[in-house]
Image (tube, rainbow, N blue to C red):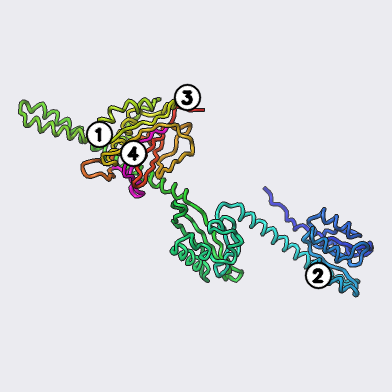
Amino acid sequence: MSPQPFRPPDRSTVLLVDDEPDILVALEDLLEDEYRVLSATSPFRALELLAEHAEVAVIVSDQRMPGMTGDAFLARARSVTGAEALLLTGYADLSAVVAALNDGRISGYAHKPWEPVALLSMIRQAAERARLGAALRDERMLLSGLMDSIDDGLSFKDREARFIRLNRVAASRLGHPVDACLGRTERALSEGLATEEERRAVEDEDRRALAPDGRPSRVLSRIERDGRTCWMERLRGPLRDPHGVVQALATFERDVTVAKLMEDRLRQADRMQALGTMAGGVAHDFNNLLTAVLGSLELAQRAAGEDARLVRLIETAIAGAERGAALTQRLLSFSRQRDTVQQAVDVNALVQAMDDLLARSIDRPQVRIEQQLQPDLPAALVDPAQLELALLNLCINARDAMDGTGTITLGTRWLVDGEEDGHVLRVGALPSGGTVAVSVSDTGSGMDEEVVTRIFEPFFTTKEIGRGTGLGLSMVYGFMRQTGGAVRVRTAPGAGTSFQLCLPAMPATAPG
């Protein structure tokens, strides 16, 4: 593509107003080489031209005109234009010049007859002021539009860290309207909204940015706001004059809580994937060893004959090896190295069919098992055996969390996109095309944030030694990854725990 030829900037527009046509012709001859010239022989026509031509940069008006004097015309023109105004006067019109200075805000005046070079110079200066004024208005308009349209806090502070400009978002985070913030420091405005430590940190960061050697900075802060944890990213940049001296500070503040949570989840997913790969490798090798051990034990069992003591020892060894084999199968399930058979499953029927199994597995008369099943639930696309095992693991964990007394509730429902229900941990994305949710809730002790972040790690357990392997929830995690669903956890210390398994629905059965 060939380069475009250079185009000089558009010429400024000058409006000439004089009731004498000869004077207008003389002024047009003086200006037409540099400016686009409009002319009017009456102030009333000039006002019409101003309404039609917003680009007028300079008005040159005679003072003595029939129907309206120049100073009166310029005063009226000021309400419809921001153009620079020059007045042409006679020597006896000094009082009119004073009136024009007060009411019409003229930027200069020239006597009749004028000196061409001086008048041309005056008009050039007025046109440049008009150009700079228009550029300044555009910059203000763009800055105001930017500040009012963004969803993040944007502010500017002077060398004493006092606000000189800020948008509504920044002001609302300080709990004040914009006007109330101007001329005040953030430390003074945030009293009662932030801790002394947080206020002092902001003050120190502003001071460092406004120092002679101040540099742009980025600070990520964790704060408590409205009962929830928020992460705020604050960017600071010193503003320097042409000599490099810091004169002001720009601050950009953004709520990055969602991004931080997504980053933490991604890190957790990477960690779980690495752990799954490791667990799968270990389980695969260990499974091969156990196969050889079990085979040898079976041969030894045949050779033991009638030796009861030897047979008993061999049977004990076989039982231990089989428990080890079951453990490796759970590890392989976590690491996604076992094939699943996904099919249409009536989740309500599956939960109801587990009554006896759960009663025998829980085996605590003080623990009640309740069901809250949504009728007419669409079928889920899932491996039924794996789903049963996952629910069994969750129910056993719930029993142990309640110290033998309480209620375990199994629930099903059709999950509407966007429902969160206070979940503190979410692993995986909700299935596209519809979600069948199965939940296991207990009335136990609940979990704190530190424990929740680790619950799906292999071998992590809060149970006493001998009461658990730490693989039950790891198996649930692996199963849900294979299924293409998600796990969501709602818990708090002393408030119980609820695990929600979000399963993909069969497309033909999902509600329209």
* Tag 2 residue: 101
| Local crowd size for mark 4, using a 10 Å CA cut-off: few (<14), some (14–19), many (≥20) | many
Separation of residues labelled 1 and 3 (CA atoms): 41 Å
| Residue at image location 81% in from the left, 54% down from the top | 53
Give how far across and how far down residue 293 sits, in percent: 17, 34
Please tell me which of labels 1 and 3 falls first in the chain.
1
| Local crowd size for mark 2, using a 10 Å CA cut-off: few (<14), some (14–19), many (≥20) | many
Separation of residues labelled 3 and 4 (CA atoms): 33 Å
| Dot 2: element | helix
Give how far across and how far down residue 497 sits, in percent: 35, 41
| Dot 3: element | loop
Q: Nearer the viewer, mark 1 or mark 2?
A: 1
Give how far across and how far down residue 60 sits, in percent: 85, 64
Q: Are marks 3 and 4 in contact (CB under 8 Å)?
A: no
Tell me which amino acid carries mark 4.
Asp
In this view, the residue farthest toward the left is 307
Q: Is residue 5 above or below residue 487?
A: below
Q: Is residue 458 left or right of residue 244?
A: left
* Tag 3 residue: 508
Please tell me which of labels 3 and 4 falls first in the chain.
4
How many numbered markers are drawn?
Answer: 4
* Tag 1 residue: 365
Quarter of the image for residue 120 reads bottom right
Q: Is residue 125 left or right of residue 355?
A: right
Tell me which amino acid carries mark 3.
Ala
Magenta extent: 436-458
Please tell me which of labels 1 and 4 falls first in the chain.
1
In this view, the residue farthest toward the front is 366
Q: Is residue 382 left or right of residue 71?
A: left
